[in-house]
Structure formats: C-alpha cells, structure tokens
Image (tube, helix red, strand yellow):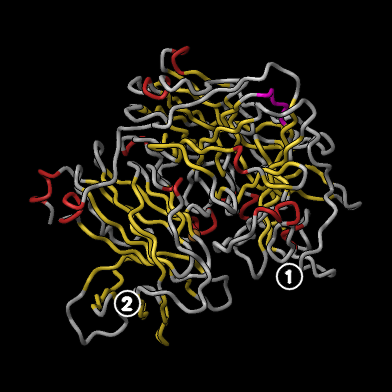
Amino acid sequence: MTRTLVPQLAPFIDGLPLPQRLIAEEHNGTLVVRMRMGEHRFHRDMPVSKIWGYDGNVPGPTIEAERGHPVTVEWRNELEGPFPLVVTRAPTHADARGVPVQCVPGLSGGQTDPNAASLTGHAVVHLHGGLTPAVYDGWAENLLAPGQSAVFHYPMDQRAALLWYHDHVMGITRFDVYAGLWIVRDQSERELGLPEGPPFEVPVLIQDRNFDLDEQGRLTGRLVHKTDPEVMEAFAPFTVVNGKVWPALDVQPAIHRLRVINASNARTYRLVLVRNGDPELDRITQIGTDHGLLRAPTRMPPDGLVLASAERADLLVDFSDLAPGTVLTLFNTAKAPFDGSPFAATGAERAADLAGLLPHPEVMRFRVVPGPAQRRVFPVTLATDYGAPSSAELADAKRRAIALVERELEGETNMLTMRELAPVQDSDSTGLLTVTQDGMTTRYRAVAAHFEDVTTFFPVLGEYEVWQLINLTGDTHPIHVHLDPFQILSRRPIRYEISEEGIEDLVIAAAITLERDPADQLDHTIDDNERGLKDTVRVNPNEVVEIAVRFTNYSGRYMYHCHILEHEDRDMMRPFVTMPMELMPFMA
Ligand SMILES: [Cu+2]
C-alpha cells in the first residue's frame, strides 16, 4: 500500500523555533528548571495544545554547559492536571478505508484510557548521555510528585557532546517525554572553529506527534498517544521539529551545524536531504555522534542518515554554493516499525507508505536567503582523545549476553523484553539458549527477565566489558546504556530457531547460529558514523551486536533499556550496578 493521504496541515508554514538557551556559566552553574503545564501551538493552523514541559515549553530550554564546570539544577515539579494527553488503543488496526489508524489523527474509535487520564504528574529527570553519579541519574522509581523538587548535581566531567534531558518515570515514560537539549562544550572542540550558537548552530529535535479531532473532523490540538491491536508502539503521522509540525528554516549561504536528535517514542528516521527531486547527501558531513566528535568526518550512508530513538548526530550542512530562493527538503524514508530494511535515497520524495505507517515523509525544509557566501574548511582530524579498545584490553574482559525477545501473551499485546543470560555447563538441562559459532556451542540459561528481577550485572569500574546483544525479534531495537559511552565492536548476522517451549519468563529455548539466514536481506554493517562513542545502538533483526563498555567514575545503580519507549515501559529495561574494584571481594 503506497497511496498517500492528504495532510490536514500544510507543511513548511511555521519557522523552525530555536529553544531558549540557558547558558550555565551565566548563572554561576546553578539553574532552576520548572516542569509546568503550558500552552503550545504546534502549527499555525491548529488550536493551541495543552502540554507538560520544562519551563512549560516544547522543547524545554537548551542548557549549555562547559566541560569541567559542574552544573546544579533544581528540578521543580510544578505540573498540574489534567493530564494533557489522551491515551487510547483503537479497536482495529485499519479504518473503514483500509488506512492504518496510526497514519491519521483522532482516536479512530478508541476509548480514552481512564488510568492515563488520572495521572497527576509524578516525574523524574534523566540526563541522557550524562556521566552522572547514580543519585542524580534519574532512577525510574525515584519520583517527584507535583509540589516536590530535587537538586541534581552534574559534574560535567565529560567531553563535548549533545545530551538531552527527559522524563523517565517507570511504566509511563511513553506518555511524557517532555524533553530539552543539553549541550556540553569544551576547549578542544572549540579549537576546531565549529559554529557555536545561532545562527549557524541549529538544534534539531525530531518527534512524531498525533492530535485529536473534533466532531467535524478538525484538529483540536489535543495530544494523542494511539496504539492499535497489531502495533503496540505509537507511531504518529505528524513530524514535529523543535515543537512545530514540518517547519522551515531560512539559512544563509554558509555551512550550518545541525545538532540532530531523534526524541520520538518509537519511530526511527532515515533522513535524506533533497533538492529538485534529487538527494544531496554530499552536502552533509557528520562530525559527531551520541558522545561527541568522531575521530574524522564521515559521509552520509548512501541511503541516508539513520537515527533511532535517542540517537544523535552532529552534522555540517553546506549551503554556501546555493543561490537565494533555493529550497531543500529533509525527508524520512524509514518505515515503521523499523526493521533495518533499505530504501534508496533517490526515492525519498515518494517514500510515503501507509502500510509502513509513514503517511507523510516530510520532516522540514531549508530556504536559502541572501547573505554573504561563506565557504570554510574544517580539519580532517576531529578527535584524538579516544581509540578502539585494544585486543589486550578486551582479552580478559567480562562477557555478558542479553537476548531481545518477543513474548506472546494470551489475550494481550505481545511483550518485547530482554533476558539476561548466564552460561551453563550442565548438558542435560532443557529450556536453554544455545549460541553456535564455528562449530562451538555455548549454552545459556536466562537468569533475569523483568526489571524487578534480581540484579545480575555488577561491572567493575575501570574494566572493559563486552556485552553481546542478540536480537530474536522482527524489529530494530535501540539499546541505551546509562552512564559511560561504549563502542560498537561488531554487528553480525545470525539465524535462529525458537523451539516449541518458546519464550517464557526464564525458559528461553532457542538455537542461534552465527551465520546469515538465507532469507535475510540486511547487510549488518557498522556505518562509519557508528564508529564513535555511542550510548544507544541499533540492534537489527537477525543480528548480534557486540559493544565494549567501560564504566569509569561513578558506582551505583543504573539502568539499560530499549529506547523505544513502549518497549522500555513494558519491561525492556534492566538494572546494573557499577562497583569499585576493592569492594568486589566483599560481595556475597
Ligand atoms: Cu525495543
């Protein structure tokens, strides 16, 4: 099904808003941010929406910090009801015309979820990408009720990067990802002469959003979280950038630095810049990823830049050769739910696909305006402060294995969850997961399935670990690890069989072989832009990804999870506890 829908809002009407800058140095490193109800207009032609947001805005203020200069934020919860979002599950996957209900606004016959409507605004703030002591990391169960506040200390002992702060409440993060950006700057980055601040540095926070309709079928502006019997994630039809649906940005003929983040619940984007119908990916150079600068600039992947939920990209886009009046449009070619399938950049303008829950591939537009043409050359070496871990460093690394699984439930939507695995020697047991590579088989038992199950990961500070993420589902999962960044070591194809015992809580009977499934079309490569310091990695279907992670300064209880919020909220999240070496002999 590739026919398109007429959008109910005209694209490229509103200008791209730039969030208010909150420069920590100007406030002696001490900030107060209020979580508040606010009113926000997502599009010129739609009524204002009630929202919850940081300082009452969508997105919240962009906090700018300096490496080595700690920042203290008093997060004040001043949220007031009623809950500004309607949660519903439509009774059918498609409407009477055969259009999937997630491609259109409105409730599509669904009832308002009364439990969600009763939410009163418990909140907890997580600084995603922050090297933050555990007490300030925003543990999902340590909540602030309205009227309560917390003072969090952020050491900012970390390299320059684009971070973001967002709500992380256990079980309902998918309903309240109000968010804001947090930029860390440092001297070594500044020496490269990259654009800093407006007009040439532009934050681009992308989310998909849906809205309710009135009885006449007009958009009311009321925010909607809609799922359906076949799709447990909410994929919304409207792409919102910095709080506006399909905005436009006027750019001078110069290089612009776009700090891009996918802050959507579940949608993965594959971004393609198009002029006169043709992709112009060569205009874009990627210089940074989740935890800051790459070692060297990289070109865009040939199909476009893939960003799953929570992934970031630091991009230089060269408009310097373009005449005033030139128009370039950013499109998304990724179907939902995303499974890594390719899509040629040349077809970006025609990427609309209702079956793929992508009714409107437009993201935003750039319009070149008059100005002095500025051509600049940036260095070919960007960062020299990190390298891939050596084989010596990894030789004795603790190895951990995690299976990403889909559990079928009677009368309920399937649950996408994780299983932490431990190797077993006992060859008689059943209900095991086996991994076979080059004729050698390792047998594992699941030792933890739910967030509240016993903690099994106790990484030692300063030591490399290798985590193996094994995807036994049909979707791509962006797996996020709190605290220190990691590096991707490998991404390899697997084939697997799940036996009749299937996937129960701690029974997971599956046989995995590290070789390509003949039906598998994905290339399972690591993109050049993934060879940096990451905190979120895409694990595609039929794939095992190995990451090398080393926790450094902070011991305590942290979380790792899928950043598809509907998965995270339904148990695709687990704790780990980082430990100082000298305490290990005293652990039971
Ligand atoms: Cu997931």
Residue at 34% in and 48% down: 487
Q: Look at the image and give the residue range highlighted in magenta.
A: 249-253
Distance CA(mark 2)–CA(mark 1): 36 Å
Please indicate whether residue 296 sits to the left or right of residue 313 in the image. left
Tag of residue 433: 2
**Among the 4 quarters of the image, the one containing residue 197:** top right
Residue 92: mark: 1
**Dot 1 amino acid type:** Thr
Specify whether tag 2 is near ligand 1 (CB below 8 Å): no
Residue 83 percent across, percent down from the top left: 65, 43
Say few, some or many: other residues with alpha carbon within 10 Å of mark 2 (under 14 / 14 to 19 / 20 or more): many
Q: Give residue 486's position: percent from left, percent from top.
A: 34, 46
Residue furthest right in the image: 216
Residue 177 appears in view: yes
Q: Quadrant of residue 451?
A: bottom left
Residue type of the residue flagged with mark 2: Leu
Q: Mainly helix, strand or loop, the magenta region?
A: strand
